[in-house]
Amino acid sequence: MFALGVLSLLCCLWSAAFADDQACLECHADPDLKRETADKKGSPVFVDQALIDGSVHERVACTECHAGVTTDHGEHLPRARCSSCHEEEEAEYTTGLHGVARQAGVEDAPACGDCHGSHQILAAADPRSTVNPQRQPATCAACHADIAFIKRRPVSLGSPLQGYEQSTHFKALKEGKGGAACSDCHEYHGLRKPNDPRSTIYRANIPRTCGRCHEKVRQVYEQSVHGKALAYGNTDTPTCVDCHGEHRIGETADQGTGGYAAYLSRTTCVRCHESERIVEKYGLPAKRLTTYIDSYHGLADQSGSTVVANCASCHGVHDILPSKDPASSINQNNLPKTCGKCHPGAGENFALGSIHVDADRGDRNGGDLGSVVIYYVRQFYLALILVTVLGMVVHNALDFARNFSAPRLPRGTEFLRFNLSERFQHGTMALSFMVLAYSGFALKFPDEWWATPFAWLGGGGDWRRLGHRGAAVAMVGICLYHLGYLAFSRRGREQFWQMFPRWQDLRDAWQMLRCYLGRSDQHPRFGRFGYVEKLEYWALVWGSVVMTLTGFLLWFENRTLRYLPKWSLDVATAIHYYEAWLAVLAIIVWHFYWVIFNPRVYPMSLVWLTGRLSAKAMAEEHPRELEELGRGGTPDSEGREGQEVHNP
């Protein structure tokens, strides 16, 4: 009997509610019904019964939401009171950012209906619901992506939706894989400002907020040097959003995101570790980016490599610990294992000395051998480049002034200067040198405009490295060919002996200087090779040896690191770099002058193509050799047999 009574009561209530709704719908079922009040005149007040029937409020009477309303309510219908059923949600909303703004009279602040809808309110699990995770971005964007709204209310400097739609969260959400929606980070009803300690996006709370989905990562982070500093109250320490971003959170393989391998060392980590304020405040090692960029790893990183070691490769990602911590990946005892991930077989010597080598500190670095060596290598090469290039400039300027008005030497074919083999060696060396110089500097300065052709090919750094190493193989090959030519051919042995430095070369250089300065009219009488050619040849020999040795140390780094410490590669990098500058400047200032810009041969000497000199050029440039030939000097069956000899 009791059950029948309760059922009868519910039926009566339902009938009464149905009757009340019918009374409301007598007017509001009219599609043409509109407001006539001054503030919202002309806005529709039509209620579609079909929308109500499909909502979660299908059995809720109109008067339960619009409490106190009667059929003759007039123009001002009371707002729906959600709190009569949703007390907890109302309490959260009232103390939240939107509710506080609403109570302060900000009409732009969203009320319940702005997010949930008015009559067709659906459960959040319903894909059609405006608060369903997949539809939340569009719902929130109604305000937060509205330019006019953003200008009226300083809620954001821009649209967070633009960044979020490029994130891994949005991608997973759209694919139905449970990506984070707006409310997962910002809460539903109790949204608060970022500077509110109760806010889920308050700096100290961010790891816990992200940890709702990434619990294991949160646990690791909290044990790291960054997590412990945050727990201690340090607001300068990085949290999740500092490295991964706020809305545009991408996969580590997504270019442009904070976790992208090629960005870590140049943008993400350096925000703190290159900040003068933070470095000085916490006593952190300075110049982390500079020392990395100048290293072997940094050069590869600049060229766009995504596999070369970056900050996270050595220090860890979320589990970053101080080097003194035995569990740290950069602890002295753990470095062979850490570095061995990329360099299999790296020995214990690998970890000797500093990893971040600062060449600027030199012997002031407390005895760090790598920094000391690089410091003095750098000073040596800077001095050598300055003295050498300046000397070349002065010498050639004097020659240019002396020969500016002199007639150009005629081109002829009377005397063979270089045979086919020698021209082949020269051409191969010249081509390989130019490719090496261009690709090498493109690896060092990948963002310069002149390095863009490699970007057109795609792969950027891969093409630079491929071109550089291919040219290196060609140069080494032609050097070995040249050694064989010197050793096994009569002409080669004779050429080498004639190229060997003698005291006469110093006397010739001194006499040439006296001529340049107007102290003498007697021009030096050069043999087959003068001091100009000999300086260039032996400089080429020196440069080829140095560049080959350092280049192969850098190319086959895994084998190198089995026996040498990591800083040895940084020393090799420094030598390789400065030697390249010395070689390029010497070619431009010295070699190009004598074969192109010298007034006696301008616009270019063609000997490197034809291999031959005119009799007049031979008489003026190599008179002593010409005299020897005229006296019946040693016959040369490989080069001069049958050629006409002219006496000066």
Image: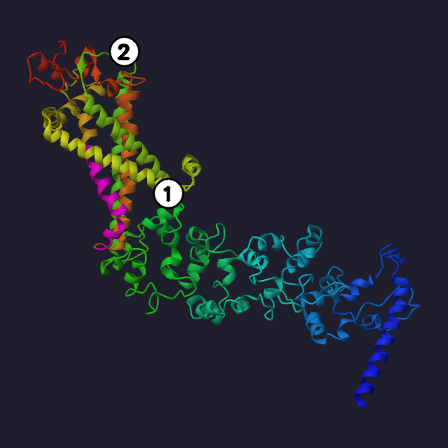
In the picture, measured across the screen, residue 636 lies left or right of residue 438, that is left
Residue under pointer 1: 462
Q: Nearer the viewer, mark 1 or mark 2?
A: 1
Label 1: state its secondary structure: helix
**Image quadrant where residue 176 sits:** bottom right
**Image quadrant where residue 478 sits:** top left
Instruction: Find out whether residue 283 is within the magenta segment.
Output: no
At 24% from the left edge and 43% from the top edge, which residue is drawn? 380
Depth check: give the residue in front, 334 or 476. 476
Q: Position of residue 321 (x, y in %)?
A: 38, 66
Lower sequence index among marks 1 and 2: 2
Image quadrant where one finds the C terminus: top left
Q: Which mark is residue 354?
A: none
Depth check: give the residue in front, 537 or 78. 78
Query: Which portion, as a residue range, is magenta?
Result: 538-562
Residue under pointer 2: 407
Q: Position of residue 163 (x, y in %)?
A: 58, 53
C-alpha span from label 1 to label 2: 49 Å
Residue 407 appears in the picture as rendered:
yes
At 27% from the left edge and 34% from the top edge, which residue is drawn? 583
In the rendered image, the residue lying farthest to the bottom is 1
Secondary structure predominantly adopted by residues drawn in magenta: helix
Label 2: state its secondary structure: loop
How packed mark 2 is, by other alpha carbons closer than 10 Å (few <14, some 14-19, many 20 or more), is few
Depth check: give the residue in front, 409 or 569. 569
**Image quadrant where residue 623 sits:** top left
Image quadrant where one finds the N terminus: bottom right
At 74% from the left edge and 69% from the top edge, which residue is drawn? 56
Q: Amino acid at mark 1?
A: Asp
Q: Amino acid at mark 2?
A: Pro
Q: Position of residue 335 (x, y in %)?
A: 30, 62
